[in-house]
Amino acid sequence: MRSVAIFSGGLDSTVLLHELLAGGDEVLALSIDYGQRHRVELTRAQETAARLGVEWRLAELGALRSLLSGSSLTSDEIAVPHGHYAEPSMKVTVVPNRNMILLAVAAGWAISRAADRLAYGAHAGDHSIYPDCRPEFAAAMAGALALADWHKLKLHCPFIAWTKSQIVRRGHELGVDFAATWSCYEGGPRHCGQCGTCTERREAFRHAGVTDPTDYAAD
Amino acid sequence: MRSVAIFSGGLDSTVLLHELLAGGDEVLALSIDYGQRHRVELTRAQETAARLGVEWRLAELGALRSLLSGSSLTSDEIAVPHGHYAEPSMKVTVVPNRNMILLAVAAGWAISRAADRLAYGAHAGDHSIYPDCRPEFAAAMAGALALADWHKLKLHCPFIAWTKSQIVRRGHELGVDFAATWSCYEGGPRHCGQCGTCTERREAFRHAGVTDPTDYAAD
């Protein structure tokens, strides 16, 4: 089975990569530069893919940044919110239609490489903030992908009903080097420890009962 | 009604722009450089948008070219087929997942601009060659778009059941300057007159009973 994985270099997609490899898939990883503030994740992605011996491509689509305005991830003028990741204030981190764009681009590469499936690491913890992480969105995209090309590509979302702490637990079983993954939306030299995604990351390790190796700037 | 139109500068999307304007829409037009061989269409798009007084943006995503290989539109090594546009040989002009990518990117911009709908000019003549021009694909994408963001964006495909000659006829009624539109996949200085899309263009004018103002290299 040949799988293309959307691989941001974050915690979820890094566990996804390990999960696919553990299942015996031939894995190709695609990272996408859409002009995100936390571009440091792309460096982590490249390093992790190299360590795992996985073919890795970067789609340099930074020109999307100016099209997809209105999010704190693509506008320097909009601050990254601090606090709990499920608060309504976190909706300012939604990048307009981001996941459809990532899925569409990755599917194009997957089809040109004759892959059997396209994997992405959406999980249940994101559902209340990110509409494009919900199972109903994934199901609609799976339907569209089945019609988009003469080559049939399946969409694979193994974590869509999992919490982030379940992903951490699974990653721990699979021997994931969590210190090599990046979550923080601020994109500074260290994880800030205070933004929504840092808060979510810390909570996931705590709930999973797994030691958090992350170097947070604020404790 | 604010509409974002995917605007290649080709015949179909130029008529689409006129159709939306005739209906009273506020129209924003997006052209997308995905590394296509016939980039000349983008220049035509810019000129037409300026003439119509329509806000125009170019998404410079030329890096997609190397991801979306296997098509004669994105590979210099694969020749553009000549002959009838409905022949199976024309499938080499299918760019993997192209329309999903165009729709996804344009939807991201449309959402960030709070548009009511996203319009694209797929038509019935393309159905047998381009899977992502079929009504079932458009319906699946409309479903996915309704779930992709908290802002609800409608997909509008007014030509999906039309032949290209019907589009020509409608464009003629609307006073479209057809000479300013570009179709040829070869992307040379003049329309080649022999590739599938030139053949289709000529036939559409003939069937519509409208004078074809195109300067073809081969007659």
Image: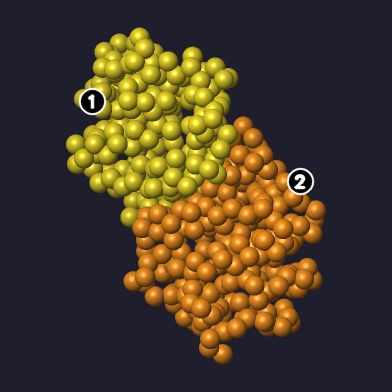
Chain colours: A orange, B yellow
Direction from residue B151 to residue A191 in the image, left or right: right
Drawn side of residue B33 relative to residue A202, left or right: left
For the C terminus of chain A, give its image quadrant. Answer: bottom right
- Image quadrant of residue A43? bottom right
Q: What residue is rendered at 67% in x and 70% in y? A: A163
Q: Kindly identify the amino acid type of the residue bearing the numbered disc 2.
A: Met
Q: Secondary structure at mark 2?
A: loop
| Disc 2 target residue | A1
Alpha-carbon span between mark 2 and mark 1 = 50 Å
Q: Position of residue B84 (x, y in %)?
A: 49, 14
Residue A18 seen:
yes
Residue A146 x %, y %: 62, 39
The chain that hosts pointer 1 is: B
Q: Chain of mark 2?
A: A
Residue where numbered disc 1 is placed: B177
Instruction: Name the one closer to the observer, B119 or A8.
Output: A8
Q: How far from the left and from the top, in percent, is residue B119?
A: 38, 40
Mark 2, Cα crowd under 10 Å, few <14 / some 14-19 / many 20+, is few
Look at the numbered discs 2 and 1 and tell me whether their residues touch, using CB distance below 8 Å.
no
| Image quadrant assignment for residue B77 | top right
Which residue lies at the image location 76% right of the left edge and 73% below the top edge?
A: A172
Q: Residue at x 57, y 84 (%)?
A: A216
Does residue A116 appear to the left or right of B17 in the view shown? Answer: right
Question: Secondary structure beneath disc 1?
Answer: loop
Q: Amino acid at mark 1?
A: Asp
Measured as percent of width and height from the top left, residue A82 is found at 47, 80
> Considering only vertical position in the picture, is B169 above or below A48?
above
